[in-house]
């Protein structure tokens, strides 16, 4: 049997390890591409011509839905399985609508993913199926997974995408790091200038003032995109009005509290 050519577009260490330890050792597969950059994904896929692409939605420089749209616009697109921690039915529906063949939620069972890949490799043409039925089944399958088992980085990224903070801006990484620090030590929000900004600046080899400005810019981007309803939905109550915008510390504390309440 001819090997299935796999492309893995995902910048997570978990996925890289799975690719190295599982797929690379399986004689049924040939990994022709492993990348974590959304901006160059289409060009790399065109050059390597995989049969199946495993694609994350949270990518630097260009998000996975945009990459998916580019892949599907190719003359002979490969089949795409989304592998993501984003669990909202909006993401699932959009991905399937754009042309994804399946949607697997992280953390996933490698054997299950294996079965899905091999099934797609054997199916030459997709059978027509009601899109909403397919989405409903996928959403039902991951709703049984407890929230606390999801990776903290990916859960924070889920919130950022929902509220409209793009992954390619500097403040995205700084803000995610700030929230993780606030989850580990909630009191650090009270020393945001003296402790939190300097700690992040040291980790990313920059200055505290640049950290502060980048985080402020990330929050402003979300508010300027007008996704106030999405923001309020994330927290389950009307936290902000259209003309209200939180300070850096308020937003960090709000998201960190949500993570703590959900059982991080």
Image (cartoon, helix red, strand yellow):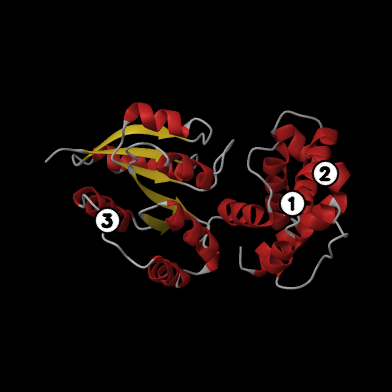
Q: Is residue 70 left or right of residue 220?
A: left
Q: In the picture, residue 262 is in which quadrant? A: bottom right
> Which residue is painted at 19% across and 38% down in the image?
3
Quadrant placement of the C terminus: bottom right
**For marks 3 and 2 on the same chain, the one whose residue lies earlier in the sequence:** 3
**Front residue of 156 and 126:** 126
x, y percent for residue 227: 72, 58
Spatial CA distance of label 3 from label 2 is 54 Å
x, y percent for residue 153: 59, 51
x, y percent for residue 88: 54, 64
Q: Is residue 188 left or right of residue 101?
A: right
> Which residue is painted at 71% across and 50% down in the image?
181
**For marks 1 and 3 on the same chain, the one whose residue lies earlier in the sequence:** 3
Q: Which residue is mark 3?
A: 126
Q: Which residue is mark 1?
A: 225
**Front residue of 62 and 98:** 98
| Mark nearer the viewer, 2 or 1 | 1
Q: Is residue 99 visible?
A: yes
Q: Which residue is mark 2?
A: 195
How packed mark 2 is, by other alpha carbons closer than 10 Å (few <14, some 14-19, many 20 or more), is few
Q: In terms of secondary structure, where does tag 1 sit?
A: loop
How packed mark 1 is, by other alpha carbons closer than 10 Å (few <14, some 14-19, many 20 or more), is few
Quadrant placement of the N terminus: top left
Q: In the picture, residue 7 is in which quadrant? A: top left
Q: Is residue 16 visible?
A: no
The disc label shown at residue 239, or none: none
> Which residue is painted at 70% across and 72% down in the image?
236
Spatial CA distance of label 2 from label 1 is 30 Å
Return the residue found at the far left: 1
């Amino acid at each position: 049997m001819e090997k299935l050519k796999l492309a893995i577009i995902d910048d997570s260490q978990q996925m890289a390890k799975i690719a190295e330890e599982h797929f690379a050792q399986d004689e049924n597969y040939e990994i022709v591409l492993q990348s974590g950059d959304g901006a160059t994904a289409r060009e790399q896929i065109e050059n390597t011509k995989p049969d199946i692409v495993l694609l994350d939605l949270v990518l630097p420089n260009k998000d996975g839905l945009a990459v998916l749209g580019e892949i599907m616009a190719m003359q002979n697109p490969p089949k795409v399985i989304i592998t993501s921690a984003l669990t909202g039915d909006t993401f699932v529906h959009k991905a399937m609508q754009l042309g994804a063949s399946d949607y697997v939620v992280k953390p996933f069972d490698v054997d299950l993913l294996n079965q899905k890949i091999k099934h797609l490799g054997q199916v030459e043409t997709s059978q027509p199926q009601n899109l909403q039925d397919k989405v409903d089944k996928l959403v039902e399958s991951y709703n049984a997974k407890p929230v606390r088992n999801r990776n903290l980085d990916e859960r924070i990224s889920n919130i950022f995408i929902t509220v409209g903070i793009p992954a390619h801006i500097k403040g995205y990484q700084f803000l995610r790091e700030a929230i993780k620090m606030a989850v580990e030590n909630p009191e650090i929000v009270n020393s945001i200038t003296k402790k939190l900004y300097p700690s992040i600046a040291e980790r990313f080899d920059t200055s505290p003032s640049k950290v502060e400005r980048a985080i402020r810019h990330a929050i402003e981007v979300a508010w300027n995109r007008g996704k106030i309803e999405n923001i309020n939905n994330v927290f389950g109550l009307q936290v902000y009005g259209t003309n209200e915008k939180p300070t850096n510390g308020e937003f960090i504390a709000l998201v960190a509290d949500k993570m703590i309440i959900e059982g991080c």
